[in-house]
Image (cartoon, rainbow, N blue to C red):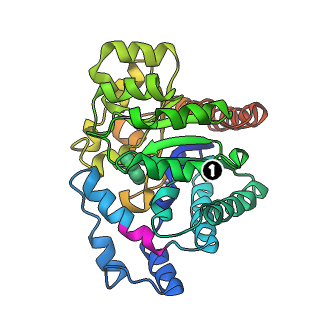
């Protein structure tokens, strides 16, 4: 029987578009662009998906994205993700992209955005809405982020917001605060990865110094009761990615995942896929797995879906539409 999690209408809020690069597409794009991957076959690449921590994953993630060169590559990548996500019930998707990593290879920002937006526009015609969140790499020199931002801020209307990703521990948010301040002044939303491998202090600084409205991962927030109280009172959405946390060894097994404790603490939890091509499943599969692991029923799944919608940056009218779809899903099976 297919899991009800796969038909549940939902929003995906934590998704790196480069992390949706399936090995087959990686080799197709490598051939198209005359780029050599450091692997001889799809099987050999897939066999390399054994990670010991975030950094071991990032090394492979940045190596594979070398095949992404043109507007068409970014369009095809996002289109493949959006098709697959739609088949699992995703109705709204906010895509992170790492323009800075592509700038280092000479890929123009405008090409990346044009390709991604073409795929999003096509998806919108099929009933899946969404937008783009430009992420800065916290482990790279801030000057690189500033260079990308100088271009991005010329057309802020192409973005929903800005984010911060890559290696967390030892890479504090302070150097990026001025960029986030400017982005917020331009009316952009702000999100940040925090509390994935770093402790609760990383979450506090993302909130205080970047004005982050959502925290990506945030699983270590539970270590600080005052932070938990603050996140619950302020309804700060946490974009949790269970398969990612298991694959990157932030938790030992799915059974050890803090998701039930986070829900019990009244946190605004959402379930997402992070880098689904690398971590063994898309949004629906993450939800199906936690539903099975923790015995979540339709009411809890509907709550997670509502959290994803109310935690999204979709316009109010679209949120109402999506919430009505979740209500219909919840009552239809009774
Ligand atoms: N899980 C993750 N954490 C930080 N940066 C990332 N970039 C892609 N996936 C990431
Ligand atoms: Zn992430």
Q: Which residues are magenta?
A: 63-67
Q: Nearer the viewer, residue 328 or 48?
A: 48
Place of residue 204 in the rendered image (x, y in percent of width and height, measured from the top left): 38, 23
Residue at screen point 45% across, 19% down: 231
What is the secondary structure assignment of the residue under circle 1?
helix
Residue at screen point 38% across, 17% down: 228
Crowd tier of the residue under label 1, counting other residues whose Cα lies within 10 Å: few below 14, some 14–19, many 20 or above: many
Q: Is residue 180 visible?
A: yes
Task: Tell me the residue that label 1 is attached to.
Answer: 152
Residue at screen point 31% across, 14% down: 225
Tell me the quarter of the image containing the C terminus.
top right
Q: Which image quarter: residue 42?
A: bottom left
Place of residue 182 in the rendered image (x, y in percent of width and height, measured from the top left): 60, 34
Q: Nearer the viewer, residue 171 or 26?
A: 171
Q: Nearer the viewer, residue 6 or 50?
A: 50
Q: Is residue 273 visible?
A: no
The image shows residue 74, relative to residue 180, as above or below, that is below
């Amino acid at each position: 029987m297919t899991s009800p999690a796969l038909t549940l209408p939902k929003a995906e809020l934590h998704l790196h578009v480069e992390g949706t690069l399936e090995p087959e597409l990686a080799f197709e794009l490598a051939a198209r662009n005359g780029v050599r991957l450091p692997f001889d076959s799809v099987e050999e690449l897939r066999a390399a998906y054994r990670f010991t921590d975030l950094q071991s994953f990032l090394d492979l993630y940045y190596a594979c994205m070398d095949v992404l060169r043109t507007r068409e590559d970014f369009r095809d990548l996002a289109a493949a993700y959006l098709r697959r996500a739609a088949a699992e019930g995703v109705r709204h998707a906010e895509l992170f992209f790492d323009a800075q990593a592509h700038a280092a290879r000479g890929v123009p920002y405008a090409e990346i955005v044009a390709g991604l937006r073409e795929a999003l526009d096509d998806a919108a015609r099929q009933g899946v809405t969404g937008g783009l969140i430009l992420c800065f790499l916290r482990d790279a020199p801030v000057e690189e982020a500033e260079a990308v931002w100088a271009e991005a801020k010329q057309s802020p209307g192409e973005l929903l917001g800005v984010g911060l990703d890559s290696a967390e521990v030892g890479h504090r948010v302070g150097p990026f605060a001025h960029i986030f301040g400017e982005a917020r002044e331009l009316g952009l939303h702000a999100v940040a990865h925090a509390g994935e491998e770093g402790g609760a202090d990383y979450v506090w600084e993302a909130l205080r110094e970047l004005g982050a409205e959502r925290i990506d991962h945030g699983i270590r927030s539970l270590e600080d009761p005052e932070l938990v109280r603050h996140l619950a009172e302020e309804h700060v959405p946490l974009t949790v990615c269970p398969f990612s946390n298991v694959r990157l060894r932030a938790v030992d097994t799915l059974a050890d995942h803090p998701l039930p404790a986070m829900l019990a603490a009244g946190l605004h939890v959402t379930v997402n896929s992070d880098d689904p091509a690398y971590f063994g499943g898309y949004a629906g599969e993450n939800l199906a797995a936690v539903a099975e692991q923790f015995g979540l029923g339709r009411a809890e799944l509907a709550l997670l879906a509502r959290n994803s919608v109310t935690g999204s940056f979709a316009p109010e009218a679209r949120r109402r539409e999506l919430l009505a779809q979740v209500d219909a899903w919840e009552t239809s099976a009774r």
